[in-house]
Amino acid sequence: MPVCPGGAGRGWHARTPACPYAAPVEPTHPTTEATASRLPWQARLPFFYGWIIVGHGLLFSFFGIGVTWAASILAIPMQDDLAWSRSDIFFAVSVRGWMAIFIAPIIGRYLDMENGARLLAIGGGLLNAASLLLIGQVQAVWQFVLLFGILGGIAQTAQSGVTVAIVPKWFIAKRGTAVAYSTLGGAISAFAMPALLAPLSDGVGWRMSWVVVAGLAFIFACLPALLLRREPEDVGLLPDGERSAQAPVAASSATPVRRAEEGSTLRQALSERTFWLLLIGISLGSLTNNGVPAIFTTMFVERGFTLEAASSALVAYGVASMSAKFAWGWLTNRLHVRPALVALTLFGVFAMPSILFLPEGLGSITLIYGFLVGFFVGAFIPLHQLVWSVYYGRAHVGAISGVARPAGLFFAASGPFLMAASRDLTGAYDAGILLTTACVAACAVCIYLARPSRPTGGLVVASSSTNT
């Protein structure tokens, strides 16, 4: 083959007037700048956009659970002003969760669509803020049930799907940590809401307090929804922030390539015994999510503690809940969710009824019980939300969790009403606490029996030169 005179050692080059000999030209990758300019802005950030999605989940969980704390804190002034019973107020809290039974199966499949999650979150945020604003004008029980329970329940269900279905789509290797962090909002609200609403209610009254909550919900849980995206592939990214296939790489480099995570369709999941064991176990365990924490303040006030001392249980609950999310989130990145949940629920069997056995004269009883319950519930919430993506993959997790969530949300929503009914019928919360403990024990058994039927995805390292 003809060789360019004087071209030895200069490598291949194209034909030029000075050199009439054609030579093959090595293919070159487009420049990083040119490639980056064609990517969505989310893929050009100096950090992984998935953590923005985690932030969405945190804000949604803050106001999703935070309004339950708000109802708990404002229950006493509302009861005194409107002559309502405790059950009247907490019935609306339960209705808020019961709405998910009807709404979650409908919206589940939309969470798997490209723009579905964002539209649901924006619509839910607007409806939530509007219903909270109008609560400041209620005069009758049915009005509170309609606004807080029915309309608020629709809104909360629309936004709560982000943590269950959207955050797991953005992560695989770091999924445990991401889901745990996205649920931190509920723990933060446990001590942020009392700190805000207790003095606010004393200063401006419970009606204006609801207006303030509505304004905060609009700013922090509605407007950010505009930035929500379904999954990393929609914006030129890969799960966990790995290098996108569109990014330029050297031909000789070894590039981490994500092996496709094996997943199941909704039809496949419904045909498995494991799915139904998980559904039953998680549903029963979810009775603890709102039930016991919601009655911390009133339970300790009736035991002779001051309102300030009773509120310290919520502070301890919040601190323990946050600590548990960090610890168990890290653990589930390294351990399958099944043994983690079994161990956690066994701890819950001890923690939930401990109030019945702690010495009455113990001055720090509020802190101890708040910490024990917070450590259990704080970890149980992200772990049971993690179950569906770990067992069945991320492709159809919206549809699968949409079928699975209603039962769990029903039990979670029933907790406050069950506790209030226990107190109204027996004069104490003991029966409700013991029933909740039995449900946690049943959850442990179901999770233990629910053996995974598919392997999880992982990482393989391959030379990029093989990806031709």
Image (cartoon, rainbow, N blue to C red):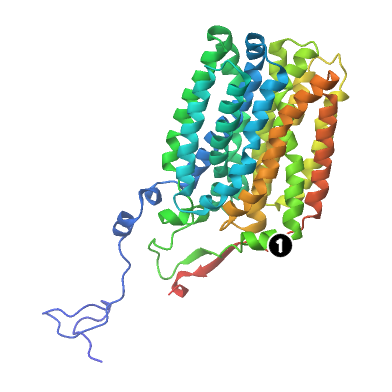
Q: Nearer the viewer, residue 110 or 177?
A: 110
Left of 140 or right of it: where is 438? Answer: right
Residue situated furthest left in the rendering: 17
Q: Please state, as top left, top right, bottom left or bottom right, where the C terminus lies in the image.
A: bottom left
Q: Visible in this render: residue 241?
A: yes
The residue shown at (46%, 38%) is 123
Q: Please state, as top left, top right, bottom left or bottom right, where the N terminus lies in the image.
A: bottom left
Residue beneath label 1, please? Answer: 271
Q: Nearer the viewer, residue 331 or 342?
A: 342
The kind of residue tagged 1 is Ser
Left of 15 or right of it: where is 232? Answer: right
From the viewer's perspective, is residue 29 above or below residue 132? below
> Residue 154: percent from the left, percent from the top?
56, 37
Q: Visible in this render: residue 173?
A: no
Left of 56 or right of it: where is 300? Answer: right
Label 1: few (<14), some or many (≥20) within 10 Å? few
From the viewer's perspective, is residue 125 above or below residue 87? below
Q: Nearer the viewer, residue 106 or 404?
A: 106
> Residue 391: percent from the left, percent from the top?
67, 56
Residue situated furthest top in the rendering: 203
Q: Quadrant of residue 12?
A: bottom left
Left of 23 or right of it: where is 55? Answer: right
From the viewer's perspective, is residue 177 above or below residue 202? below
Q: Secondary structure at mark 1?
A: loop
From the viewer's perspective, is residue 367 above or below residue 109? above
> Residue 88: percent from the left, percent from the top?
69, 21
Residue situated furthest bottom in the rendering: 1
Question: How many numbered marks does the figure carry?
Answer: 1
